[in-house]
Image (spheres, rainbow, N blue to C red):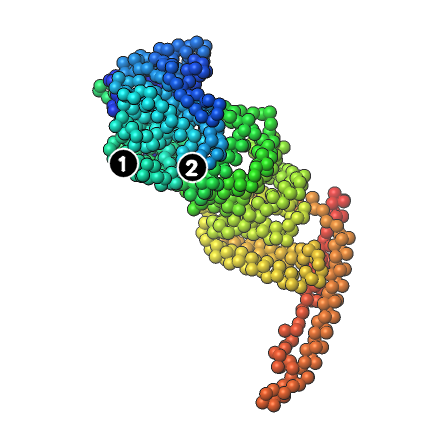
């Protein structure tokens, strides 16, 4: 299934074709194009054009609503309202006005009258449990020769309308728009008691049309003729299982499809809306010309056609299922919804509504201004979001965190991105193929990103994003990185990191550690050098959890790892054979290092924790050990690799050498260590070693006494107490004095080296 679109709107072609549309519309015989055009008219902001008394929807001030239909409009009258409200330039860019003009020239539409405009305008809805949230919908009643067609508009620009759409997944009784839409239809059917009715709608409006049909068919079934849903979503599982008039909602919908009152849902073959949730028995897939699947929900990218009699419809695709990317997207959303209870989803929608109100985002225009405004930096905007998040109650925060974890369920997000990339590769659009290349280059890191996100909460994510944006803003934006050398990047990162608050430093180090662990685990086979560096980072993090030196080394290693990774990828074809031969050895070495780190930590914990009571001593011992192991590791790695990549040294030796020098320079020129403090610690270690030696001597004396003290067994044999209680030299040995003395010697050497470096720095 290849995409051939280039994101070209077909709206201009539609405007040219509508005047040629012919044939009479009836409640039993109207098309998907008719339904779409009526839904667009339902979306007109009639109150702004004609005044509040034209709106059939009215609030009574006591939480109830009523309807009136004292205003009807023909197409010329609606056009006149627009012309009185806007200047010529604004009219030429107003899609609804241009649709009205085209329809007024068509024999099919020119004589139609529209009545009962309804618009809830972000009003508060109170559900059966007394919970309140913002809801809205728009509708209009279309007068055709043999009855009425009630059409519901899509969500429109209201942010709260989009949030209300999300509540479809977590309510049984129906969201405000569904309930009000059904009440509106009931009012109109009672007002025009002799007329037959049909229902239609686009997007959210298509869902409302289906909901209204199912809810009213038991009472008005002989008068309801046909319902068309244009790319509207389905219903939640709990809603489908809810009983209505003695039948489940699912059974009612199945019967309506069977008798033809509900027709197959018209949706683009790249749809991501029409197939959401449940209820749709069949689909009619439409052609759509946008390569960006999320744009194809917009009808202006669909292809309209006229048959030989001038009857309009949308061009049907020859496929019988949506694209794999669309299916993967729906599976991702399904995984997200199934992982959260209705109550959790409800808390999430409340949190989103609260967030938008606090940020003064009421419509899509407000949202665009929030993201594009230069009045505040991105980090300041994230800080504002974080402040609002902190003010939310625990249930709302937990819902946000659950949503983040739900995205990672069963690798659904990763599967969607891969499927979408494969779909984009089939497009003739250069932009689509560029996006596909970007997605492909990032695929290797999807598991790392997923493993990080699995352990993250929204608060940490916001903090991290704020810190990262703060750094980019400080250096002049992401583009500034292109003009910086490796050493400049390393230095600026270190400086920025060192000026962070300690809480933020901890967050950064934690995330770096998780990233390194994921790389070491998942990339040893494909990128052993990167995995080697990641292992070094893990060791550093395990022994230097809060030191400035660790932070600086980690930053430098990360920069170096990135550069080496680039070189590795560039020459990957030349060294793939060499890499394969190293894989098994490197994986075994990683396992060895991991086990020795664990054993060393345990040994130090047992031998030194009670004796020294000082984590700094523990760090010194393990740091010394780690330095030896890393040295051995690199030396062995060099021996293993030497013969197989000898020819490659010419290509990559110099870049790696300068990368190493840059990293070394970062650590060396910004080293801060107190030599006197180290000597003091060395003295303490020597004293502890002496105590351990005395303890070993006492234990040795005890062992000899047990050896020469005899006792009788039951069979009157004489044996030593040592033999009776199975005491030997190893069971009573502490053997820590030598370890501590060796550590003291290494520490003395380290102090000497550091003092020499201090002298070098002072001379420099």
Q: Residue at 30% of width from left, 36% of height from top? A: 252
Q: Nearer the viewer, residue 584 or 144?
A: 144
Residue 550 in view of the camera: yes
Residue 122 position in % (x across, y down): 47, 25
Task: State which quadrant residue 154 falls in.
Answer: top left
Residue 70 position in % (x across, y down): 38, 15
Task: State which quadrant residue 209 falls in.
Answer: top left
Q: Secondary structure at mark 1?
A: helix
Q: Residue at 54% of width from left, 50% of height from top? A: 517
Q: Nearer the viewer, residue 569 or 321?
A: 321
Left/right of residue 638 with respect to residue 112 in the rendered view: right
Rendered-image quadrant of the C terminus: top right
Q: Residue at 30% of width from left, 25% of height from top? A: 198
Using the image, determine if residue 730 lies above or below residue 424. below
Q: Which residue is disc 2 drawn over?
A: 171
Which numbered dot is residue 53? none
Using the image, determine if residue 169 lies above or below residue 188. below
Rendered-image quadrant of the N terminus: top left
Using the image, determine if residue 38 lies above or below residue 724. above
Residue 664 in view of the camera: no
**For the view shown, which residue lies furthest in the bottom direction?**
716
Q: Which residue is disc 1 drawn over?
A: 255
Residue 718 position in % (x across, y down): 63, 88
**CA–CA distance between discs 1 and 2?**
23 Å
Question: Closer to the N terminus: mark 1 or mark 2?
Answer: 2
């Amino acid at each position: 299934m290849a995409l051939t679109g280039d994101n070209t709107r077909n709206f201009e072609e539609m405007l040219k074709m509508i005047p040629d549309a012919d044939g009479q519309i009836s409640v039993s015989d109207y098309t998907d194009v008719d339904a779409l055009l009526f839904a667009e008219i339902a979306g007109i902001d009639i109150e702004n054009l004609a005044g509040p008394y034209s709106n059939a929807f009215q609030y009574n001030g006591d939480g109830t609503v009523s309807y009136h239909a004292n205003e009807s409009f023909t197409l010329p009258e609606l056009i006149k309202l627009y012309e009185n409200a806007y200047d010529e330039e604004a009219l030429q860019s107003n899609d609804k006005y241009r649709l009205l003009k085209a329809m007024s020239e068509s024999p099919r539409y020119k004589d139609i009258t529209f009545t009962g405009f309804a618009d809830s305008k972000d009003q508060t809805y109170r559900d059966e449990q007394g919970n309140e949230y913002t809801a809205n919908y728009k509708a209009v009643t279309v007068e055709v020769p043999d009855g009425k067609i009630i059409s519901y508009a899509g969500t429109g620009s209201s942010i709260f309308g989009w949030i209300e759409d999300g509540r479809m997944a977590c309510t049984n009784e129906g969201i405000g728009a569904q309930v009000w839409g059904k009440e509106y239809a009931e009012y109109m059917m009672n007002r025009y008691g002799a007329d037959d009715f049909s229902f239609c709608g686009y997007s959210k409006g298509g869902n409302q049309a289906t909901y209204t049909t199912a809810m009213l068919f038991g009472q008005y079934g002989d008068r309801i003729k046909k319902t068309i849903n244009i790319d509207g979503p389905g219903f939640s599982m709990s809603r489908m299982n809810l009983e209505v008039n003695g039948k489940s909602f699912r059974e009612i919908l199945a019967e309506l499809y069977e008798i033809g009152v509900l027709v197959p849902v018209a949706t683009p073959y790249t749809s991501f809306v029409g197939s959401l949730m449940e209820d749709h028995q069949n689909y009619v897939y439409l052609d759509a010309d946008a390569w960006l699947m999320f744009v194809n929900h917009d009808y202006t990218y669909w292809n309209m056609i006229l048959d030989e009699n001038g009857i309009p419809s949308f061009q049907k695709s020859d496929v019988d299922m949506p694209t794999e990317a669309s299916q993967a997207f729906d599976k991702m959303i399904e995984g997200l919804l199934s992982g959260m209870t209705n109550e959790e989803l409800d808390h999430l929608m409340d949190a989103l509504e609260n967030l938008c109100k606090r940020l003064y985002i009421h419509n899509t225009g407000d949202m665009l201004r929030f993201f594009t405004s230069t009045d505040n930096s991105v980090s300041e905007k994230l800080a504002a979001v974080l402040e609002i998040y902190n003010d939310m109650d625990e249930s709302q925060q937990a819902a946000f965190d659950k949503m983040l974890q739900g995205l990672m369920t069963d690798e659904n997000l990763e599967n969607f991105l891969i499927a979408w990339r494969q779909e984009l590769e089939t497009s003739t659009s250069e932009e689509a193929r560029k996006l596909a290349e970007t997605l492909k280059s990032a695929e290797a890191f999807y598991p790392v990103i997923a493993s990080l996100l699995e352990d993250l909460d929204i608060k940490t994510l916001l903090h991290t994003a704020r810190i990262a944006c703060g750094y980019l803003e400080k250096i002049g934006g992401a583009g500034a990185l292109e003009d910086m050398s490796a050493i400049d990047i390393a230095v600026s990162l270190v400086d920025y990191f060192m000026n962070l608050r300690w809480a933020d430093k901890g967050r950064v180090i934690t995330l770096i550690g998780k990233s390194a662990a994921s790389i070491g685990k998942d990339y040893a086979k494909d990128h052993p050098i990167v995995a080697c560096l990641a292992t070094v980072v893990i060791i550093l993090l395990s022994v230097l959890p809060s030191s400035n030196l660790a932070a600086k080394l980690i930053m430098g290693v990360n920069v170096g790892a990135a550069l080496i990774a680039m070189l590795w990828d560039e020459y990957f074809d030349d060294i793939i054979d060499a890499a394969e031969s190293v894989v098994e050895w490197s994986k075994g070495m990683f396992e060895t290092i991991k086990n020795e780190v664990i054993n060393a930590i345990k040994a130090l914990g047992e031998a030194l924790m009670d004796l020294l009571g000082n984590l700094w001593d523990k760090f010194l011992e393990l740091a010394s050990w780690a330095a030896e192991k890393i040295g051995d590791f690199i030396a062995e790695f060099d021996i293993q690799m030497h013969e197989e990549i000898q020819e490659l040294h010419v290509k990559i030796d110099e870049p790696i050498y300068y990368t190493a020098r840059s990293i070394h320079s970062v650590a060396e020129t910004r080293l801060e260590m107190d030599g006197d403090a180290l000597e003091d610690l060395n003295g303490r270690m020597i004293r502890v070693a002496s105590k351990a030696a005395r303890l070993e001597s006492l234990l040795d004396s005890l062992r000899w006494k047990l050896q020469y003290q005899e006792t009788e067994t039951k069979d009157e044999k004489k044996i030593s107490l040592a033999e009776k209680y199975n005491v030997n030299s190893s069971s009573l040995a502490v053997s820590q004095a030598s370890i501590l003395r060796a550590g003291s010697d290494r520490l003395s050497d380290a102090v000497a080296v550091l003092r020499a470096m201090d002298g070098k720095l002072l001379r420099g």
